[in-house]
Amino acid sequence: MRGAPALFGLLALALWEAAVRLLGVPVYVLPGPIAIVQAFAADPVGLLESLTSTLFVTFAALAMAAVLGGAMAVAMSASRLAQAAIQPWAVALQVTPLPAIAPLIIIWVGQPFLALVVCATIVAFFPLFASTASGLASAPPELNDLFHLYGARRWQTMRLLRLPAALPYFLTGLRISGGLALVGAVVAELVAGSGGFASGLAYRILEASFRLEIPRMFAALVLLALAGILLNYGLGAIGQAILRRRGGV
């Protein structure tokens, strides 16, 4: 069963290669897997360096989203005033399309790397914030009453009851936000690349599309897809290990 995804992938690649060869599809319309591998082999260092740049932005944005999302969720859980102040703005930030505001952020921030991180953080922020807030509110009411009965202070209830209850939710949000941070980094890099800032794998995709180097563009897309899969599985494994160590799984 564990090998099923790999076998399915190999079968799909074989059918893809056979189809483009039998139908005579031009490489600039749809390259086959072999042409994509050859495009990667022609410049592996350049593509991998660009991928590394994109991943730096992704991980920096994920860290910022984790800190900001967790802190704001805790503040919102601790104070109704903070909830009334934070929640509408968090929702507004979530529904704002990144391509519409990314050019402004890049201009306002000025420093290219930091601007990309800010853009990716905006995309990754809400799942962490919403998941953590849900987790903080998920503590059993009877336990909350018990803490109150024994005279526990608000910060003690938060530290000993609500934060442990929120941990699985936070880790789930972290896994979701990991993929979104990568998407946000790619979108921001596409906008920055259109403005002449060459950085990241998204810029390589843009560059290859302008030059009609479609196999190279597909090679960059495959690298992004693989990075997203590894990021998702990696964050999931980290979350399971943390919960297992705490006795949550």
Image (cartoon, grey):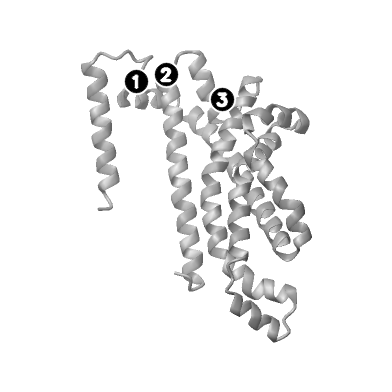
Q: Amino acid at mark 3?
A: Tyr
Mark seen at residue 214: 2
Instruction: Name which quarter of the figure residue 155 lies in.
Output: bottom right
At 58% from the left and 26% from the top, the residue drawn is 190
User: Which structural element holds mark 1?
Assistant: loop
User: Which structural element holds mark 2?
Assistant: helix
At 52% from the left and 56% from the top, the residue drawn is 172
Quadrant showing the C terminus: bottom left
Residue situated in front as seen by the camera: 157 or 9: 157
Q: Amino acid at mark 2?
A: Ile
Query: Quick check: marks 2 and 1 in contact, CB under 8 Å?
Result: yes
Residue 61 position, x and y percent, is 63, 44
Mark seen at residue 31: 1
Asked if residue 242 lies left or right of residue 64, the reply is left
CA separation in Å, label 3 and label 2: 14 Å
CA separation in Å, label 3 and label 1: 20 Å
Instruction: Name which quarter of the figure residue 30 lies in.
Output: top left
Q: Amino acid at mark 1?
A: Pro
Residue 94 position, x and y percent, is 63, 42
Residue indicated by mark 3: 203
